[in-house]
Amino acid sequence: MVLTGRAAGAALAGILVALAFRTAAAVIVVNGLIMVAIIADALLAANVRQVRLTRAGDTRLLLNQTGSVSLTVTNAGARSLHGVLRDAWRPSAGAQPARTRISIPPGREVTVTTMLTPQRRGDTAAASVTIRSLGPLRIAGRQGQHLAPWSVRVLPPFLSRGHLPQKLAMLRELDGQHRSLRRGEGSEFDSLRQYVLGDDVRSIDWRSSARRAEVVVRTWRPERDRRIVLVLDTGRTAAGRVAGIPRLDTFMDAALLLAALAARAGDRVDLLAVDRRVRARVIGAHRSVDLSALTDAMAGLDAELIESDAGLMTSAVLATARQRCLVVLLTDLNTSVIEEGMPSIRLLASRHLLVIAAVADPRVAEMAAARGDATAVYTAAAAERARSDRAKVSALLRGQGIQVVDAPPDALPAALADAYLALKGKGRL
């Protein structure tokens, strides 16, 4: 049984009446009447156990995207249900409204819609549904909790999707340049042409020849489509925020843009997320890789407050890709971490074409330019030292034949896509 604010008001009114009469009998009578009203109101309230709940709505949402989940409440009892319903979700789900007033006649149903604007990636599950049924006087009622399971997977937002049309146009231009090159021996079908004396008879396409009433042969070109392994560093440094965004989220955004671009180019895309163990793995995807496989794998990832194991990253990549391919490692250019993991990085660079992508903090450049007072000068000196250390790490990596992409959060996805296209244009991929 639950009491409402009206019960408190009735009790206060009863006290005032009892004080007016100033007798014990008056107090007993007033309190008795209030108790009888409360008990009767609770007994006359609809039974919350005779309620049936069903859900429908969105099961997948992008981070910070608004979606809806509907809850259908069926009153299977013999009395009208008047009261309040609370559909509880975790705070990060951004559920609105928190409470809804309901009025359901016997045998009827109503639908309550909850709007969700999730603030964290991963699976967001609904908690219990609390229903408070009030009696005719609205001073007391019954309350019960029901389970109505529902889960919404919150995916990375892919904010860099807007760059995709421009990068695809650049990719088509590169593809046109490659197709204009001399056709020759290879493993990938290119086109058909008329047979000329000296052509290999094994290249004759007999079906096409029959349809055209002339002998035609297949021409081939070297296969230019390759494999790409995206490696997300989910260790301690990925938890740091740059421009208010965790590095890991920026890594995911850049990886999704590169994966979408590579899939259009026909390249195979694999994903590894590693710190001191492999957190996620998407291996063996078709060339027309569905981005949903990558976003699903990324949805539940969070940065772990532990140092990443460079040796484990290298062994995971080598076990995944035995033939030479493009490996894109999204990590931080932390001096101590890079120097400690340099043997593993060298091994990886010797077996594969390695690109390291990192998030640069634009705030460091702002601090380095400050000269207002003594504190600003010391801050600028510290910022310059940080920039110098980062430049040394980049130079060290480039000296090992590793390409480094170091850009602010809003520019990293496009910069990484440009690096990929540059490799394609040079014929290195």
Image: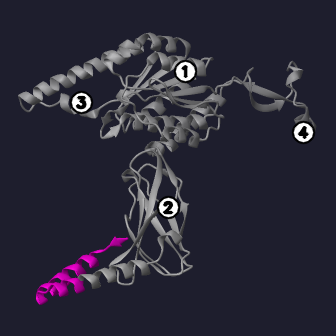
Element type where label 4 sits in the image: helix
What residue lies at 37% left-to-right and 13% top-to-bottom? 340
Q: Residues within 10 Å of mark 1 (few under 14, many from 20)?
A: many
Horizontal and vertical percent for residue 111? 51, 71
4 and 2 marks in contact (CB < 8 Å): no
Check disc 3 and report the residue beneath it.
364
Query: Which of the image's four quarters has the N terminus?
Result: bottom left
Element type where label 2 sits in the image: strand
Q: Residue type at mark 2? A: Val
Q: CA distance from mark 4 to mark 2?
A: 59 Å
Q: Earlier in the sequence, mark 4 or mark 2?
A: 2
Q: Earlier in the sequence, mark 1 or mark 2?
A: 2
Q: CA distance from mark 3 to mark 4?
A: 67 Å
Q: Compare residues 224 and 47 and report the one nearer the observer.
A: 47
Please give the range of residues in magenta.
1-30
Q: Compare residues 209 and 223 and report the one nearer the observer.
A: 223
Q: Earlier in the sequence, mark 3 or mark 1?
A: 1
Question: What is the image's colouring?
Answer: one colour
Check disc 2 and report the residue beneath it.
69
Corner quadrant of residue 332? top left
Corner quadrant of residue 358? top left
Q: Residues within 10 Å of mark 3 (few under 14, many from 20)?
A: some
Q: Is residue 180 left or right of residue 145?
A: right
Q: CA distance from mark 2 to mark 3?
A: 43 Å
Residue 212, numbered circle: 4
